[in-house]
Amino acid sequence: MEIAPELIDRIVAHARRDFPNECCGMIAVQDGVAVSVHEAENLAASPLRFEVDGLEVHKTIEAIEDAGGELGAIYHSHTRSEPYPSQTDVNFAAGWPGVEWLIVGLRRNSDEVVVRSYRIDDGRVSEVEVVRA
């Protein structure tokens, strides 16, 4: 997935705003290029995990598809660990095959932010490049 720096900035700003809790949201793509970011509410309000409302997710995906896109990635932040999928992330990803998992590493809300993306298929995690375009 290619993603414009402005969209990465929006995701990082969301992570900072929700800190110390994890943030979460979705990224719409068209032809492999990110076109929009859709913030979601972390119902868990937790620094250790995120939880989203299924109806909110459904409505967001419908809006993405109505605009001619598709769900390309789910994003969230890690506020206490490295930006690498946890076992909880891996388990959650089982329901979303083919979707990238973009994770923002934002420890202690420092200025140092690390953004990484992964594919998680059949429990196997593989990092994919975040192409800033």
Image: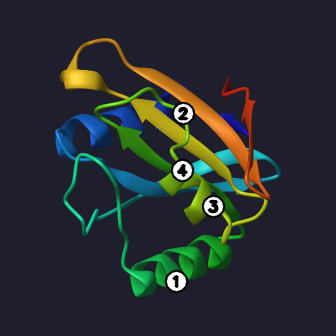
Check whether the beta carbons of the residues at disc 3 and disc 4 lie within 8 A of each other: no
* Residue beneath the point at 58% across and 75% down: 61
Query: Circle 1 sits on which residue?
Result: 58
Query: Circle 3 sits on which residue?
Result: 93
Distance, label 4 to label 2, CA atoms, is: 10 Å
The quarter of the image holding the N terminus is top right
* Relative side of 63 to 119, left or right: left
Report the front residue among 68 and 2: 2
Within 10 Å of disc 2 (Cα), the crowding (few <14, some 14-19, many 20+) is many
Query: Circle 4 sits on which residue?
Result: 87
* Nearest to viewer (mark 3 / mark 1): 3
The quarter of the image holding the C terminus is top right
* Residue beneath the point at 29% across and 34% down: 79
Q: Which mark is residue 84?
A: 2
Q: Is residue 91 above or below residue 8?
A: below
x and y percentages locating residue 35 in the rendered image: 61, 50
Amino acid under disc 4: Gln
Toward the top, the furthest residue is: 112
Give the structural element (helix, strand or loop) at label 4.
helix
Amino acid under disc 3: Ala
* Relative side of 122 to 12, left or right: right
Amino acid under disc 2: Tyr
Amino acid under disc 1: His
Give the structural element (helix, strand or loop) at label 2.
loop
Report the front residue among 126 and 104: 126
Within 10 Å of disc 4 (Cα), the crowding (few <14, some 14-19, many 20+) is few
Toward the bottom, the furthest residue is: 55
* Residue beneath the point at 37% across and 30% down: 81
Chain-order first, disc 3 or disc 2? 2
